[in-house]
């Protein structure tokens, strides 16, 4: 079975459009006082670093926070995965 790949030119054009929409979303959320949390969950060497870089590279660094978390502890492995991220979440109180 062969994989169907898109050309690099199409990939780059599509990525640029999606990044532009993400910047628009960030600006809208800032204007409305809203927040957005995005979690990338995956195994080591799953491509998260490249994906996160693509997502965050055009966003405002003042309004964007990227947190790299260590592997879960043996205790955390048995909990709901989202519990690990609550402490890092930008929650308004």
Image: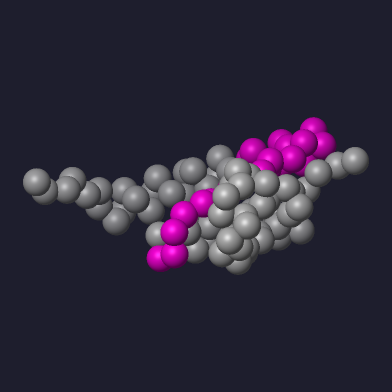
Q: Which residues are magenta?
A: 24-45
Foreground: 38 or 78?
78
Is residue 39 magenta-colored? yes
Furthest residue toward right: 93
Q: How many marks?
A: 0
Q: Measuring 56% from the left and 54% from the top, which residue is drawn there?
A: 77
Q: Residue reaching furthest left?
A: 1
Q: In this view of the protein, can residue 22 be seen by the observer?
A: yes
Q: Nearer the viewer, residue 8 or 91?
A: 91
Q: Position of residue 41 (x, y in %)?
A: 51, 51
Q: Please, which colouring scheme is shown?
A: one colour
Image coordinates for residue 60, horizontal then vertical, percent:
69, 55
Residue 3 appears at what percent x and percent y?
A: 17, 48
Is residue 23 something one can see in this rendering? Answer: no
Using the image, determine if residue 64 lies above or below residue 30: below
Q: Is residue 18 magenta?
A: no
Residue under the point 22% across and 49% down: 5
Q: Residue furthest top?
A: 32
Q: Quadrant of residue 44?
A: bottom left
Above or below 91: residue 76: below
- Coordinates of residue 68 in the picture (x, y in percent): 62, 64
Q: Classify residue 33 as left or right of residue 66.
A: right
Residue beneath the point at 53% across and 51% down: 40
Quarter of the image where the C terminus is located: top right
- The part of the image, by quadrant, that contains residue 58 is bottom right
Kindly identify the residue that appears in the image at 70 percent across and 57 percent down.
65
């Amino acid at each position: 079975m062969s994989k169907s790949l898109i050309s690099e030119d199409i990939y780059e054009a599509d990525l640029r459009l999606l990044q532009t929409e993400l910047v628009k979303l960030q600006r809208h959320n800032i204007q409305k006082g809203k927040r957005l949390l995005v979690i990338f969950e995956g195994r080591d060497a799953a491509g998260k670093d490249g994906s996160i870089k693509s997502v965050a590279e055009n966003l405002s660094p003042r309004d964007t926070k990227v947190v790299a978390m260590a592997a879960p502890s043996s205790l955390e492995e048995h909990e709901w995965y989202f519990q690990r991220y609550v402490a890092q979440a930008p929650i308004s109180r």
